[in-house]
Image (cartoon, rainbow, N blue to C red):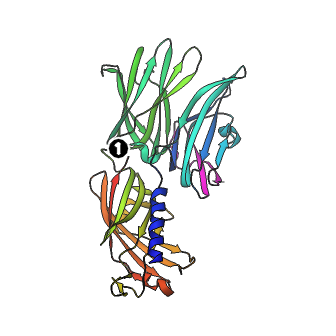
Amino acid sequence: MYRKVLALLVLGMTIGAIPALALSPGQDVLVPAAARIVDPSWVTDLYVMNPGNATVSVEVFWLVRGQANPNPTSITFNLLPGQTEILDDVIFNNFMLSEGEGAFRVVASGAVVVNSRIYAVEDAKTYGQGFEGVPTWAATAAGESSSAVGLSDGSAFRSNVYAVAGPTGATVQLEVVDPSGTRIGNTINLALGTYQPYLRRVSDPDVMNTGTFANGSLRITVSAGSAVVGASKVDNTSGDPTTLESTASGGGGSPDGTYQFSVWDSYGPATGGYLVMASDVVDYFEGAYLNFDKGVIDPETGEPINGGTSECTTLFPFWPDAPADVAEFATGFQFSFNYPGDVGFSGGDIQYTVTFTMNGSSAFSGTIDAVGSNFSGLDAGCNGAFPTMDLFGGKSN
């Protein structure tokens, strides 16, 4: 009974510890624009923070503008809990390039927050703009649309459109509309390769050929792949730019995004967790299960019920080490998890099989099967097969 009460206390802490969902943190993050130019002088600083409570390994890839980047160069480092890596003039100091235009991809073993600043130094003063790192699951994906507002092009300002494609490239339709919704200039279709960055002025004749306009919005529609797309508005007199980020996509056409899920046993909900999907890959998957089904002691008889030889009322957190294709979950994704011994707990191993299928583009349902081994003493009831648990998930963004 003591262990059951303890498990309930830990359950409360675990549910509270599941991260609040936000746009910025992610394990696979795209910074859509970066540059280093000698004349006039522009440099880029990159910031990567670990908001978690465990050390993470980080790899930063340099994506060259105007080309696909299937095998880009990279740098690696580790981040302690709460630590921020500040990469000053990152294109020169870390990638050894005196000049370069492109974007960054940041991949980490745990969720990180990424931000950047492109700026010029003139008369001991700086001016520039920032670009937030966008997790790949938050990119605009096939079947989705988004918008950026506040564009202008003429004698006072000029506007650029920027983009960086995801792992399978992207087909992106772009057009500028005036405040009434009427298109200005041409509609264009971009075909971008793997992790290919793009940056062009919207009024250029071979782009959207908008001519002069005072106020406009950029309409973005992705028909294949995924991309982070937005705009930049530049003051023609000072050269000072402003980033015009696009709206978050609605998730209507793609299963990509963050999902919260619940785990149910025969008694009802038994906690849950969250996972992140991007481009048919489950990038991150974390949850917990508080067992009330296997080896539970019947309070009237004092004997275990539902199998086992002794009580097994224990909180089991789980998270696979590596991403997996969504297709693997359709047939049953397997992974093992070791639970170390502690005071009053022998420890052991559990092999999980997680199976689910999508219900449309924003929900899934399935099962979790678990088989315990190497538990001993009072925890021997955790050995063998657990009753099958039900799994239900829904998209939160």
Magenta range: 55-82
- 88, above or below 275, in the image: above
* Residue 30, image x, y percentages: 51, 43
- Please say whether residue 285 is one of the residues in the magenta stretch: no
Quick one: 210 or 396, which is closer to the camera?
Answer: 396
* Residue 367, image x, y percentages: 32, 68
- 382, above or below 316, in the image: below
> Which quarter of the rendered picture does the N terminus lie within?
bottom left
| Residue at the (49%, 57%) spot, across then down | 17
Residue reaching furthest to the front: 300
Relative to 129, 179 lies left or right: left
Which quadrant of the structure image shows residue 287? bottom left
| Residue at the (66%, 42%) spot, across then down | 86
Name which residue type carries label 1: Ala
Q: Would you name the residue on which mark 1 appears?
A: 142
Give SS at disc 1: loop
- 180, above or below 265, in the image: above
Confirm whether residue 85 shows in the render: yes
Which quadrant of the structure image shows residue 392? bottom left
| Residue at the (48%, 25%) spot, across then down | 160
Crowding around mark 1 (Cα neighbors within 10 Å: few <14, some 14 to 19, many 20+) is many
Relative to 180, 194 lies left or right: right
Quick one: 224 or 130, which is closer to the camera?
Answer: 130
- Please say whether residue 57 is one of the residues in the magenta stretch: yes
| Residue at the (38%, 50%) spot, across then down | 256
Relative to 199, 50 lies left or right: right
Residue reaching furthest to the top: 155
